[in-house]
């Protein structure tokens, strides 16, 4: 996670000051009516969302940071229902339609909502996010959250969101697909670029998903390039299978600077020279990724071709030599 840029932080602080000075908040605090809280939501969540959207497009590695700033009680819980949904959908899902690992950011946002003085108003907008998040989590993890709550009404509310029907894997799958559709027009994906092998083991799957997502939309990826350069320069990763898969994604879909392209070529070449299974692994991932995204564009193939050292005599070189001819002359020739 990257820290939020000072310019974004200044904008966020201005929104917070406006919320605290607003007539809508004063009226809500005086009368505590649901309609008054909805007026507060209507007036200020749009400004938060506009800022969030800009961060998501230009600096996606800062998204968790902006969400953590929104946990400040002076934002009155605004935008937290959306952030809760984002946190639910970011978690990687295994074949059993369960999270690979506990989602601590989901927990942090949920606990902030639970402890908010505006919980009674916010909870009207978070039921489905909690239901899906709980269905994907382990029973022990859910129990630990609920048992830590002293307020009986809040505890009863959370217990009611743990639905028995989601014990069935097919029901979980169907519910998750429907829930994702509600967020399909929103950009909230982020990732961690690991610094160590231990971190790579944990983060690789999410990082691959993020890189594929960012490569398929009309996003500004310029601010990712320095982070990518740092990541692929780490020779500690060179023998890791996930690292090579990520290098292939970068070669296919990202326009790196000169230094980044050279490091990418060096990493792929090291794998080809030292890993006896390199060729099988290379083509296995190339084929599976092509199936996953519905095939490559010619430009994708040309991009990766630039990172293939042709002095290495193997089937990877033979394949890209042939591909160069096909892409330059056409399939008819």
Image: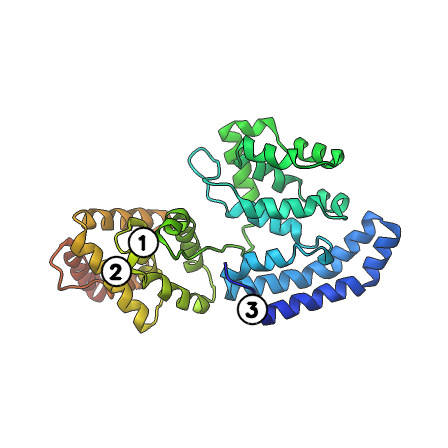
Colouring rule applied to residues = rainbow
Count of marks placed on residues: 3
Whole-number angstrom distance, CA of label 2 to CA of label 1: 9 Å
* Left or right of 1, for residue 311: left
Residue on which disc 1 sits: 243
Q: Residue lying furthest right in this view?
A: 30
What residue is disc 2 on?
267
- Answer with left or right where residue 156 lies relative to residue 325: right
Give the distance between the C-alpha atoms of the residues marked 1 and 3, in whole angstroms.
28 Å
Residue highlighted by disc 3: 5
Residue 255 lies, with reference to residue 167, above or below; the image says below
Residue at left offset 33%, top offset 52%? 295
Give the residue at x 61% y 42%: 129
Residue 243 visible in this rendered orientation of the protein: yes
Crowd band around label 1 with a 10 angstrom C-alpha radius: few (<14), some (14–19), many (20+): many
Badges 2 and 1: C-beta atoms under 8 Å apart?
yes
For numbered disc 3, what is the local secondary structure? loop
Q: How far is mark 2 from mark 3, CA to CA?
A: 31 Å
Give percent across and percent down for residue 324.
20, 63
Percent position of residue 318, x then y: 14, 57
Q: Is residue 182 visible?
A: no
Q: Residue furthest left?
A: 313
Residue at 63% from the left image edge and 59% from the top image edge: 69
Considering only order in the chain, which callout, 3 or 1, is on the residue closer to the N terminus? 3
């Amino acid at each position: 996670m990257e820290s939020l840029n000072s310019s974004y932080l200044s904008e966020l602080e201005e929104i917070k000051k406006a919320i605290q000075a607003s007539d809508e908040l004063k009226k809500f605090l005086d009368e505590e009516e649901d309609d008054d809280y909805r007026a507060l939501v209507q007036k200020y969540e749009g400004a938060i969302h506009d800022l969030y959207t800009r961060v998501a497009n230009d600096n996606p590695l800062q998204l968790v940071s902006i969400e953590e700033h929104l946990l400040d009680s002076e934002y009155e819980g605004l935008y937290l229902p959306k952030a809760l949904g984002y946190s639910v959908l970011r978690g990687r899902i295994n074949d059993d339609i369960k999270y690979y690992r506990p989602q601590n950011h989901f927990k942090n946002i949920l606990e902030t909502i639970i402890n908010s003085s505006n919980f009674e108003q916010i909870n009207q907008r978070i039921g489905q996010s909690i239901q899906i998040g709980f269905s994907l989590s382990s029973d022990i993890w859910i129990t630990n959250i609920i048992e830590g709550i002293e307020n009986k009404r809040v505890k009863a509310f959370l217990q009611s969101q743990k639905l028995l029907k989601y014990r069935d894997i097919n029901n979980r799958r169907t519910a998750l697909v429907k829930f994702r559709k509600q967020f399909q027009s929103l950009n909230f994906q982020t990732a961690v670029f690991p610094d160590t092998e231990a971190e790579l083991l944990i983060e690789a799957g999410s990082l691959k998903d993020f890189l594929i997502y960012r490569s398929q939309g009309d996003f500004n990826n310029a601010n990712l390039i320095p982070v990518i350069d740092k990541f692929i320069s780490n020779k500690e990763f060179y023998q890791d299978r996930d690292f090579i898969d990520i290098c292939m994604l970068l070669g296919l879909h990202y326009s790196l600077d000169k230094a980044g392209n050279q490091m990418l070529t060096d990493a792929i070449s090291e794998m080809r020279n030292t890993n006896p299974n390199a060729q099988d692994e290379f083509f296995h991932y190339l084929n599976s990724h092509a199936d996953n995204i519905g095939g490559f564009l010619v430009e994708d193939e040309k991009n990766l071709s630039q990172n293939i050292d042709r002095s290495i005599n193997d089937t990877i070189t033979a394949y890209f030599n042939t591909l160069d001819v096909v892409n330059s002359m056409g399939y008819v020739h």
